[in-house]
Image (cartoon, helix red, strand yellow):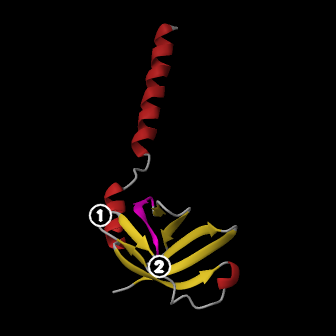
Amino acid sequence: MYRSFCKNLTGFIIGISLIYLLMPITNSAGDAQTANSLVGVWACQSIYGGPYTGRSCRTLPWLKLNADKSYIWGSEQGAWEFKNNTLRLSARKGIGRLNSDGQLIIEYQSNGIQYQQTLYKRN
């Protein structure tokens, strides 16, 4: 009985080890590379939410992401981080993400209204 138990336990441990080894690993180097490519100035291309839906947003403040992980967006200032394709701005509730076209989609809530801004990187 003890031998059977050890045999089953060994098989279980090997199985768990294989599952652990085959689990995907977060590519932190990829996150760092993408975070570096985010550094720069981003301008508004479109905005959806509240009275701004359907209006041009070229006159809205630009988002400047600095290499030292600080940012300025109009009068808003803070720190930013990018992890797992999610951009977080310290002074803004909401998140951003890169889409397949390289645009930055920022979703946030202000005064009870949900907004989505699409930003493009300025050269």
Q: Earlier in the sequence, mark 1 or mark 2?
A: 1
Q: Position of residue 121 (x, y in %)?
A: 40, 82
Instruction: Decide whether residue 83 is among the magenta residues.
Output: yes
Q: Position of residue 122 (x, y in %)?
A: 38, 85
Give, as a three-letter code, the residue at label 1: Asp
* Left-right relation of 96 to 68: right
Magenta stretch, main secondary structure class: strand
Helix, strand or loop under label 1: loop
Please rate how many residues cluster around mark 1, counting C-alpha atoms within 10 Å: few if below 14, some from 14 to 19, many from 20: few
Residue at image mark 2: 103
Would you place residue 64 above or below residue 2 in this image?
A: below
Looking at the image, the residue that sits furthest to the front is: 75
- Residues in magenta, as a range: 75-84
Helix, strand or loop under label 2: loop
Residue at image mark 1: 68
Foreground residue, 13 or 34? 34
The residue under the point 31% across, 65% down is 33
* Left-right relation of 9 to 27: right
Q: Position of residue 67 (x, y in %)?
A: 29, 67
